[in-house]
Image (cartoon, rainbow, N blue to C red):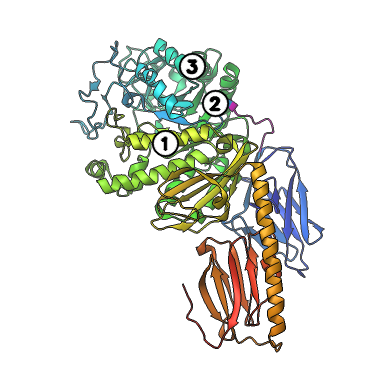
Amino acid sequence: MFNSLLAEHKTPFGAVAAGEEMTLRFTLPQGDPRTPSLLLYRAGQPQPLLHTPLCRQGDAFTLRYTPQEPGLYYYGFRLSDGTLLHRAPDGSADYGEGQLWQLTVYDKAYDIPQKFAGQVMYQIFPDRYYNSGREKTGVPADRRLHRDWREEPQSTPDADGVFRCNDYFGGDLPGITEKLPELAALGVGALYLNPIFEAHSNHRYNTADYLRIDPLLGTEQDFITLCQRAHEHGIKIILDGVFNHTGSDSLYFNKEGRYGPGGAYRDPHSPYRSWYCWKDAAANMYESWWGFQSLPKLNSRDESWREFLCGENGIVRHWLRLGADGWRLDVVDEYPDELVRMIRQAARAEKPDALIIGEVWEDASCKEAYGEHRQYLMGHELDSVMNYPLRQAILDFLLRGDGAAFRLRLWELLEHYPRPCWDVMMNLLSSHDVPRAITALGGTPMQHRDRDWQRAHNTLTVAQYYRGRQLFMLGTLMTMTLPGMPCLYYGDEAGLVGYADPFNRGTYPWGREDTGLRECIRQMAALRNGNSALSAGELEPLACAAGMAAWRRRDETGEFIICVNPGEGPLPLPDAAKYGETVFTIGQAGERRLEGQSAVIRRIREKEQNMQQNEKRTKIILWAVVAAAVIGCALWLLLPHGGTTDCTAEIWIDGQMVRGIYLPQAADEVISLTEYGKEVQLEVKNHRIAFISSDCPDKVCIHNGWLSREGEQAICLPNRVSVTLTDGSTVPVELN
């Protein structure tokens, strides 16, 4: 009837720009007298914005519609007899009430900074990456520095029972600058730095001074130098903007008195007083982020705060002016939409190609926060977001091997997100907020266990490490070959492990790197960076065995097939992958099958070669069809024509018989061959058998119709599947 993921039912695919025409095509079974109507809703509104019938065109019903206003919409269908249709998980229509189809309509002026499109990102937690050995000055005396770079981060509370995050290893900006050649060699095109501004914790999400580099990290000049050297290597710098709250121990709030007598907490007349949200100003009772008293919440609607943040000389523009190329906005769902727009406007005013990424953990296209549907991806707020939903989909696939579920989740995200943001989605497997990928894939599931349990299990066994390592390589290959910016969390490529904070924030293992893992990832990045089809090409999912995920990336320069099998056993490769040249492999890949915990990238031949190959295959198919017809006619002439059904249907795949069905006693059923990696279906009905669906191009097998007599045969040559009716006097045992 209808499937939003198929071009024959909806064009263009997914989100549309305001003013862009879309076409819906709906079909009903032959003879069904009903007429479908479209019901279109704006998010949050119970009454339909549009209720209009589709027009009959041949055997289908069609509607062309041009949405005019950016926003989040939902749609469904109602038949003329009142029957409602809703969206099934695979995008198709199903009867009854249920989930509607989502339609994201974005501003046609939505643009993203092209210099970031498809770049490999690298996230650095600055204190833990590399210590240059440079002398630091002006460092507060209450900070505790580890003597040994290889020590584990502090994970126990102090004598007062408080986990203060006040242990440091001395990683700094000059250290990052020193390692830029290695990052460039790894294929990195963008660096995302966790907070670098003065703050009194090692994570620095409790900002103390937005206009000063933390003294342990260096100076403003060190930052300028980092940006200059990074740009020389073709690397862009993205800063972490923590603009929902500051630290209570800050120049602006100054609860602890570190900054003298002033500050919003100590001085009712402080110029910063209006910056904060007060429950009871007279009693100095203030709102804080998630109840953490050390993180007083900023008043995002205060004009003086907005000017300090977004003004001509505000924070956003100041650091872009000094060399930064973009911002990642921490906990952006705490910001009102108006403030996010102001940040974007300020950034683009200073640097027209600045990138704005938001921290959003859910599907950002339909995110609801504080009772409002957010406008993040309509074209005037964020360029993209941290793609946590894709991360979860990849991890689930790698751990469970459900390729169909992964494919549906991937396409749901792509369907919801505006096309302009696809190329700058931050596709991560690890971050400072989640367990490292190798641990998540190889270790015992954390399942919200506390720090004591994490500390006891933080070191993986050899078997756990190598299982996690292998699956991590598969996951990295996936991010490297899907739309977006694949993001490496520092040290993942070197084999770092760890559960959640602070165990996921260990120091980079200089001199102890897993060099084989790093080299594998370097090669992946080089392949991606050297082929625009992999970084920016059209994406197409491929039919494959149930435990596999496979897709095609192509543009005018080339075409690649990517196949991933995270399971233990081998799986057949999809036909499309069997005609290409292997350019990269993890594990083992043969010509026709992919071994367990393996992946392969194959380059399809050049256009001219493809045409020759297709022409050759077409001739083979035609000759096979002719031969099959001749043989079938000959057999028909030799056989009696009494219409006997006393025969056995033999189903052959790749030269092996997989099932025998004695038709006189066979129950009606539909037989799917997907478990053999074939998108083919057969039907047994009234003691006959026929092909009813296939992904082959010519559908010759389907046109053969029903088989019921000994000697009759139907062949799906592209899939190498055949059905032959043989003498049924000896009934075979069904094969598995």
Label 1 residue SS? helix
Point out the tag, 2 or 3, that comes first from the N-terminus.
3
Q: Is residue 489 left or right of residue 358?
A: left
Q: Position of residue 98 (x, y in %)?
A: 59, 58
Q: Secondary structure at mark 3?
A: helix
Residue highlighted by disc 3: 232
Query: In this view of the protein, can residue 155 be seen by the observer?
Result: yes
**Residue 85 painted magenta:** no
Q: Where does the N terminus fall, quadrant-wise?
A: bottom right
Task: Tell me where residue 264 appears, x and y as whole percent.
Answer: 40, 18
Q: Which residues are magenta?
A: 106-114
For the residue marked with disc 2, what is the amino acid?
Leu
Residue drawn at 71 percent across, 87 percent down: 641
Question: Disc 2 to disc 1, how far (Cα)?
Answer: 25 Å
Closer to us: 239 or 161: 239
Q: Are marks 3 and 1 in contact (CB under 8 Å)?
A: no
x then y, percent, for residue 374? 57, 37
Q: Where residue 343 sits: x, y (%)?
A: 55, 24
